[in-house]
Amino acid sequence: MTTIAPSERGFSKVPVIFSLSIAAIVVSLFIYFSPLPQMVRESLMQRVTSAHYEILCPRGALPQEAMTEFARKREPLFAALNKKIGDADSMAEIRVIFDPNFPEPPGGESDHPSYSVTGTTIRTKLDGTTPQLPAEADEEGLLYAAWGKPGSAQLARWTAIWLLGEWRDTEIGTAAAQVEQRLGHQKVENLLENPGGESSSPDDLTLLGAAWISENVEFGGTEAVRKLYAAKMSHPDVAEVAKALGTTPLELDRRWQLWMYAYLAGMPSMPHDSGMPMDMPMAGNH
């Protein structure tokens, strides 16, 4: 009879252990990245509904009355935003999921949204017993319902803030003019490429981007913004944007300067180093 040495028996187990380890890793990755656990967890959440909202959170995390009150107060916001885009989707439903485990913005970035929007579903962190959500989150969901999937996440967020019409309780144009007084004029190319740097912050550039969307509404109407929203541009640049709007980069900058100059002219004071060119071309000059 042939006897298998202990060392040989040990080596015969190695492939089996290796195979089981690989299988365990594959299963773990599938569970981690699969949407199924999230779907199951969210299906078990408590919920309330209103005409245009469905509010969810883990059972016991919020009083039912707080969820109902949140939905009730959100309805006028929905009506106002929907009216601004021509009552494009009065039957839309926005789903808001408050989750204590929702991840914090990376690195404490103030400009990074404290929520995520997938279609008409908004997920945000539940902190305390009073549900909180920035209004622009609703706008992104409503825009998706009315106009479909955006071609650029960056332009979609700017469009959502334009739809709100204000930035931290200040009208967008006025708030943008205050930034331009401080930084000097920012060309459209700078806004789109988002260079950052010492002179500007992500917050400043997001505000100016939303103000630029407002300018496009005034010059080209809501349809111009809808073209920008739908144009497939993972990283928008001035040439692609000009093409989507049927114009030129030079004309984009001319209109943006004119619009911003009108706001700056009404400001109480403007520093000499604001960066606004004194020989800015007037309307009709090319």
Image (cartoon, rainbow, N blue to C red):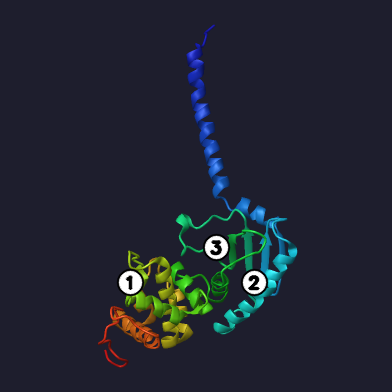
Let me know if residue 270 appears in the view: yes
Residue furthest bottom in the image: 284
Residue 123 against residue 281 in the figure, above or below: above
Q: Amino acid at mark 1?
A: Asn
Whole-percent x and y of residue 147? 53, 76
Residue 93 placement: quadrant: bottom right
Q: Which mark is residue 93?
A: 2
- Which residue is labeled 3 in the image? 115
Whole-percent x and y of residue 254? 31, 84
Residue 79 against residue 112 in the figure, above or below: below
Classify residue 181 as left or right of residue 77: left
Q: Amino acid at mark 3?
A: Tyr
What is the CA distance from the residue labelled 2 to the residue labelled 3? 17 Å
**Residue density around tag 1, few if under 14, some if 14–19, many if 20 or more, within 10 Å:** some
Q: Which mark is residue 190?
A: 1
Q: Earlier in the sequence, mark 2 or mark 3?
A: 2
Whole-percent x and y of residue 27? 56, 41
